[in-house]
Image: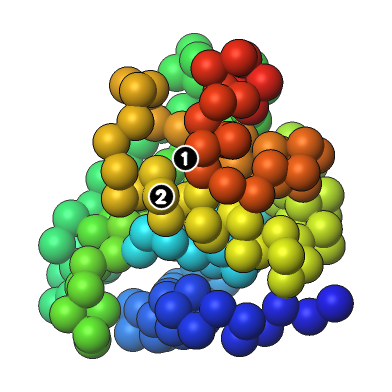
Amino acid sequence: MTIEGYDPHEAALRDEAGEIQRELGLGPRLARIGRATVVGSVALRVVVARDLDLTVAVDRLDGTTRRRIAELAAELLQHERVREVLMRDDTGTWNTDPSYPDGIYLRLVARAATGHDWSLDIWFVDEPGRQPDLAHLATIGPRIDVEAQAAILTIKRYLAEHPHPHPERIPSFDVYRAVLNDGVREPAAFLAGRVRGRHG
């Protein structure tokens, strides 16, 4: 079942995400380093916040790759639409989460032509098979039909707009799992499930 264009506001945000990728020239820039894939909410068609996630599979995280990523960061920092660039090493002893592969992280804050600011999270990994965001495209993406998309957007929008009793940021994956696995359709049911330890 296709969900393309089902939610006009969500579709507009996805279009905006595509525009900022083109404005920054991310396609050809990232292709010099590895194989880039859009992941996260944009790929799953459940965008609420202006966040764009990409994972770039590289052959190895060696000195050459690191230099190319650093050069990319410097190039992007000079782009008129980019305000902030952060580069972080999450390899070796710096990788504090063994469930994730080693990676180099690049974060951008950039302004779209619409005047809205976007946060871009780009991960460069040499073990893409261990990257959860890529796995979610295959395991979660096909399960998000019209009904599931509507429920996910309803819950995510509520969480973005209302204070809630959980001080930590609620991962989007917890919302996807609650909707797809447990049949949750409303924010109140989702939050009640978290209090009981079910959705998180």
Mark 2 element type: helix
Comparing 134 with 126, the one in front is 134
Comparing 49 with 189, the one in front is 189
Going 72% across and 65% down the picture, which residue do you hit?
147
Say which quarter of the image contains residue 92: top right
Is 66 on the left or on the right of 55, as rendered?
A: left
**Alpha carbon separation for disc pair 1 and 2:** 32 Å
Is 15 on the left or on the right of 181, as rendered?
A: left
Q: Earlier in the sequence, mark 1 or mark 2?
A: 1
The spot of residue 120 in percent (x, y) is 37, 58
Going 23% across and 53% down the picture, which residue do you hit?
85
Q: Residues within 10 Å of mark 2 (few under 14, many from 20)?
A: some
Protein image colouring: rainbow
Is 35 on the left or on the right of 122, as rendered?
A: right
Mark 1 element type: strand
Which mark is on residue 93? none
The spot of residue 128 in percent (x, y) is 72, 45
Q: Amino acid at mark 2?
A: Tyr
The spot of residue 25 in percent (x, y) is 40, 81
The spot of residue 141 in percent (x, y) is 76, 60
| Residue at the spot of label 2 | 158
Going 62% across and 15% down the picture, which residue do you hit?
197
Going 21% across and 73% down the picture, which residue do you hit?
116
Q: Residues within 10 Å of mark 1 (few under 14, many from 20)?
A: many
The answer to whether marks 1 and 2 mark residues whose Cβ atoms lie closer than 8 Å is: no
Residue 148 seen in this snapshot: yes
Residue 21 seen in this snapshot: no
| Residue at the spot of label 1 | 104
Q: The N terminus lies in which quarter of the figure? A: bottom right
Judge whether 97 appears above or below 110 on screen.
above
User: Which mark is nearer the camera, 1 or 2?
Assistant: 2
Q: Amino acid at mark 1?
A: Ile
